[in-house]
């Protein structure tokens, strides 16, 4: 426990089958410890933690005072009993929590694993596994540590894993060993393996690994595709072997399980403030009574000296008053509520159970109940002013269906036949026996185009069947099950399957499809991965005729600018179709391809290989290589996927808006899609005063658009409320002409001489903050801002302008935002508005936003459980948010406020009797009540009424 920590690593060196070499680096063992205490440390550490509470420290101080007989008129047990009871209850709770942590740790640490030691496999507990050991894993086993995959029972060194415990995703992922080690299949070869791995130090990045394997005077690049992380489960693979790289606390699973930032509520801060004020009030009462004692002893008490002398060491009235002050501090201590914090925790626990038991927040479709994952934030739910919501999977169902497409300038999926109001669903079975029976499409012109052999249509669906990362599982002949990392990919591959281009299987080097009934195998030359920065993915394949082609799909904003100039006319038509699809609320992707010659492929392949093997800036070099090849592409068309709104979303948003809660949607979708969903869910309404679009690409253009939006708000507000015109007079010109500039900066160079002159005429002192005036704006406004504009708006010298403009709006939609920008927007509102914020999302890209907000809510939907794991509350439908805030939040807040009033009232009523009695007993610190009554008043006699009201009161 007290072992000296090794210095932080700059790189990690691991040699296979050489424990002696690896132990000199003092790498962590595979034993994990999530518990806080052990038998020896529990009492001192827990008491130290509890005495961090001001009230507990105060009562310890009182206990010490009561041990001084000259000033104590109460026995020491009147303080030690309630103090010991409070400390004991908290200690038992902490000990119980830690016991379960110990139990969980022991269960994990004692799991068995097969370790290769001196040429033979031996069963070892997980806690005894060391860095550099080679482990054998069998099907359905958990991975014991972060392993480098060496070999597998599957061809090409492949193995399949499930990462639900890491990222919540239940679909299978494929991992592959380095080709040179994949041949080390048996134990003898592995026992003689002495390769050395040099890699990055332990970190929490689940999606990246950078390292190099040195073996037999050669080096091989290692990536995340070669790694099996602790917490994963081996699936559909008989067995595999792996080399332990990171163990125990150094594994990425444990690196990601850091303690979540403790969230305190406004009630907590209020209680601490009230207790400090009560301390002050207690001191004041003690001073008043001490002064009274001095006066009484001098004027009246001196008459009794002959037969009631002062007890030693008191020799004058001033010293008597001094001792009297401390005596009254002891007697009046009941005004400071020692049981307050325990009572509050009991009430919060009760409120949390009410949320968990609420049948109206139970989703029968997915058999999921609401869960309060914390007990400390319930009353804060009733004070939420801003809600930040993801769109996909939170407002929508995240169940995707292929709806429309544009191929070579022709749009498909628009079916409007007045003679056939009931649309007939296409039957693909006669045309394609491998079709998915659940697939729905209604436009038969697209099917006819496929049947007649239109080359563009065939190429469109060929791209969808090849450019993806979907895994296929064929349970029986023709019965295919696709496992996709995102619902979008699954929908697109399923569409290609129904239109005759069926993805069947993949290996590291091939993709096998069935095209119009004919089996075709493509050589997979390269996969250019998707990420949030690139917003596209590509594959490079060689067909059976030897022709090499790059297929690319991605966001239209990034893909259209990488097309060959000859595509201009087609691009204009396709862009119109994309805008139409987005206006219908559909999720869109653009699709393109590029033919490559052998020379182009060889040259690029070499540069890609160098980038892949680079040890420094590998990601940047790979991105540059991808950028180089993804140019001069030919446009094929665009796809449009429908993601329907969840049940009850419009009604929920309408009710929350009536409660004066402002809703911001932060989404990665394009502007038209987000705006259309905004209208669908009644966030944006036709009767709104105005909807402002901020889409500038430069700092100056964004500043101008924000300024114009504010001026327009003021103008429309004046029209609605003529009486307030004087308050706004001249504000637009004088206050904001130079807004956004740092202090001391002049207006020259930003707008022309007139603007600079007006700025110089602004009188010192500086104008009041914009929010003071913008709070008085009347009318319903909405703001829509793009990701590139938001990046400028979040800069330090513009954030005040952005906040003042956005917060004057009833609804705000931020489009094309990154996960980091989501968190930055939340932090911005927390910083400037001092309002309670709530963030709600369903995916891993929402985790940073959920953790940044005062309250985080996770939707247990289609994108795994990472958002739920990071949240304070979780449920399965957005509509349950209405009940969480307006029922449970309101009740919790009102109950807590009434409880505090009742609690302080009863304590003051009890204590003020002693204060008043002091005037009738010569300020001698004589008690009115029996000592046992004083001891038990808070913890027994009056505990249940206040708790009952705090838990069960309904108003």
Image: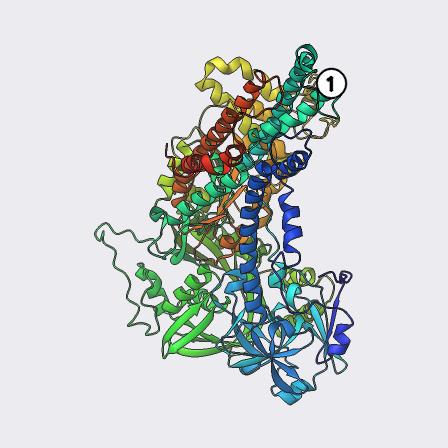
Q: Is residue 496 above or below residue 521?
A: above
Residue 705: quarter of image: top right
Applied colour scheme: rainbow
619 or 26, which lies in front? 26
Which residue does the image show at 75% across and 65% down from the upper left? 11
- Residue 815, position as x, y percentages in the image: 52, 44
Q: Is residue 15 above or below residue 353?
A: below
944 or 789, which lies in front? 944
- Residue 132, position as x, y percentages in the image: 69, 76
Q: Is residue 750 above or below residue 160?
A: above
- Judged from this view, the residue extending furthest toward the bottom is 188
Q: Residues within 10 Å of mark 1 (few under 14, many from 20)?
A: some
Please name the residue that numbered disc 1 is placed on: 318
Residue 846 visible in the current orientation: yes
Q: Secondary structure at mark 1?
A: helix
- Judged from this view, the residue extending furthest toward the top is 299
Which residue does the image show at 63% across and 25% down from the upper left? 328
- Residue 296, position as x, y percentages in the image: 66, 13
Quarter occupied by the C terminus: top left
Quarter occupied by the N terminus: bottom right
Q: Is residue 541 left or right of residue 483?
A: right
Q: Is residue 194 left or right of residue 497?
A: right
- Residue 274, position as x, y percentages in the image: 57, 29
- Judged from this view, the residue extending furthest toward the left is 419
Q: Is residue 500 left or right of residue 708?
A: left
Which residue does the image show at 28% across and 72% down from the upper left? 430
Which residue does the image show at 54% across and 55% down from the upper left? 97
Residue 264: quarter of image: top right
Q: Is residue 198 left or right of residue 834?
A: right
């Amino acid at each position: 426990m007290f072992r000296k920590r090794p210095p932080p690593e700059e790189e990690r060196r691991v040699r296979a089958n050489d424990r002696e070499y690896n132990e000199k680096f003092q790498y962590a063992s595979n034993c994990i410890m999530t518990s806080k205490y052990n038998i020896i440390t529990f009492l001192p550490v827990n008491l130290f933690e509890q005495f961090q509470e001001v009230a507990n420290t105060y009562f310890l101080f009182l206990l010490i005072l009561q041990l001084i007989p000259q000033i104590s008129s109460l026995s020491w047990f009147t303080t030690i009993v309630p103090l010991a009871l409070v400390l004991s209850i908290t200690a038992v709770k902490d000990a119980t929590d830690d016991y379960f942590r110990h139990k969980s740790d022991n269960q994990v640490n004692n799991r068995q694993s097969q370790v290769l030691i001196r040429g033979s496999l031996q069963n070892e507990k997980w806690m005894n596994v060391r860095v550099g050991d080679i482990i054998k894993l069998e099907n359905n086993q958990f991975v014991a540590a972060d392993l480098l995959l060496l070999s597998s029972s599957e061809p090409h060194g492949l193995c399949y894993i499930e990462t639900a415990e890491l990222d919540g995703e239940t679909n299978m992922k494929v991992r592959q060993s380095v080709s040179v080690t994949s041949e080390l299949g048996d134990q003898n070869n592995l026992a003689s393996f002495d390769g050395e791995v040099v890699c990055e130090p332990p970190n929490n990045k689940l999606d990246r690994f950078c390292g190099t394997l040195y073996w037999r005077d050669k080096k091989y690049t290692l990536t995340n595709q070669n790694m099996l992380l602790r917490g994963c489960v081996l699936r559909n693979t008989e067995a595999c072997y792996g080399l332990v790289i990171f163990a125990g606390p150094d594994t990425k699973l444990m690196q990601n399980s850091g303690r979540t930032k403790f969230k305190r509520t406004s009630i907590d801060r209020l209680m601490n403030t009230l207790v400090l004020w009560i301390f002050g009030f207690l001191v004041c009462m003690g001073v008043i009574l001490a002064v009274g004692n001095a006066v009484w002893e001098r004027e009246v008490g001196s008459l009794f000296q002959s037969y009631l002398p002062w007890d030693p060491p008191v020799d004058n009235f001033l010293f008597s008053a001094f001792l009297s002050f401390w005596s009254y501090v002891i007697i009046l201590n009941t005004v400071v509520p020692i049981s307050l914090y325990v009572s509050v925790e009991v009430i919060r626990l009760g409120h949390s159970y009410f949320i968990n038991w609420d049948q109206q927040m139970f989703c029968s479709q997915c058999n999921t109940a609401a869960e309060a994952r914390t007990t400390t934030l319930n009353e804060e739910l009733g004070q939420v002013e801003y809600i930040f919501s993801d769109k996909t999977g939170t407002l929508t169902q995240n169940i995707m269906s292929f709806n429309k497409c544009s191929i070579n300038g022709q749009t498909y999926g628009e079916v409007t036949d007045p003679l056939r109001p009931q649309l007939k669903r296409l039957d693909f079975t006669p045309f394609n026996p491998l079709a998915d029976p659940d697939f729905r499409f209604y436009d038969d012109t697209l099917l006819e185009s496929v049947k007649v052999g239109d080359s563009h249509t065939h190429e469109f669906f060929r791209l969808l069947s090849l450019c993806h990362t979907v895994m296929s599982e064929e349970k029986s002949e023709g019965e295919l099950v696709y496992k996709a990392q995102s619902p979008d990919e699954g929908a697109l591959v399923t569409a290609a399957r129904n239109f005759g281009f069926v993805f069947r299987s993949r290996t590291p080097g091939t993709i096998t499809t069935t095209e119009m009934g004919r089996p075709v195998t493509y050589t997979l030359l390269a996969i250019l991965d998707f990420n949030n920065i690139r917003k596209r993915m590509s594959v490079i394949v060689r067909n059976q005729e030897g022709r090499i082609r790059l297929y690319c799909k991605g966001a239209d904003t990034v893909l259209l600018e990488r097309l060959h100039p000859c595509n201009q006319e087609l691009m204009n038509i396709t862009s119109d179709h994309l805008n139409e699809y987005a206006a219908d609320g559909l999720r869109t992707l653009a699709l393109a391809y590029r033919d490559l010659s052998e020379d182009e492929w060889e040259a690029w392949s070499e540069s890609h290989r160098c980038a892949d093997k680079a040890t420094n800036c590998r990601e940047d070099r790979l991105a540059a290589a991808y950028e180089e090849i993804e140019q001069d592409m030919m446009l094929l068309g665009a796809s449009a996927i429908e993601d329907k709104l969840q049940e009850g979303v419009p009604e929920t948003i309408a009710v929350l808006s009536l409660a004066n809660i402002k809703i911001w949607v932060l989404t990665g979708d394009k502007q038209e899609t987000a705006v259309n969903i905004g209208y669908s869910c009644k966030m944006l309404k036709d009767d709104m005063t105005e909807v402002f679009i901020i889409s500038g690409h430069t700092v100056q253009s964004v500043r101008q658009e924000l300024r114009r939006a504010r001026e327009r708000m003021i103008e429309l507000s004046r029209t609605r409320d003529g009486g307030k015109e004087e308050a706004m007079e001249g504000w637009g010109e004088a206050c904001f002409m130079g807004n956004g500039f740092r202090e001391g900066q002049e207006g020259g160079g930003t707008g022309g001489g007139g603007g600079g002159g007006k700025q110089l005429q602004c009188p010192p002192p500086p104008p009041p903050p914009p929010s003071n005036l913008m709070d008085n704006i009347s009318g319903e406004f909405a703001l829509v801002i793009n990701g590139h504009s938001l990046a400028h708006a979040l800069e330090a010298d513009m954030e005040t302008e952005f906040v003042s403009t956005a917060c004057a709006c009833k609804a705000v939609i931020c489009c094309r935002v990154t996960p980091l920008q989501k968190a930055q927007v939340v932090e911005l509102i927390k910083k400037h508005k001092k309002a309670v914020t709530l963030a709600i999302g369903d995916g891993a890209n929402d985790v940073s936003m959920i953790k940044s907000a005062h309250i985080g809510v996770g939707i247990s939907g289609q994108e795994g459980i990472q958002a739920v794991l990071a949240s304070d509350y979780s449920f399965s439908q957005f509509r349950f948010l209405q009940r969480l805030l307006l029922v449970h939040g309101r009740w919790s807040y009102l109950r807590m406020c009434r409880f505090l009033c009742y609690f302080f009232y009863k304590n003051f009523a009890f204590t003020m009797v002693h204060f008043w009695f002091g005037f009738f007993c010569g300020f001698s610190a004589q008690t009115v009540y029996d000592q046992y009554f004083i001891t038990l008043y808070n913890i027994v006699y009056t505990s249940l009424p206040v708790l009952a009201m705090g838990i069960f009161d309904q108003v």
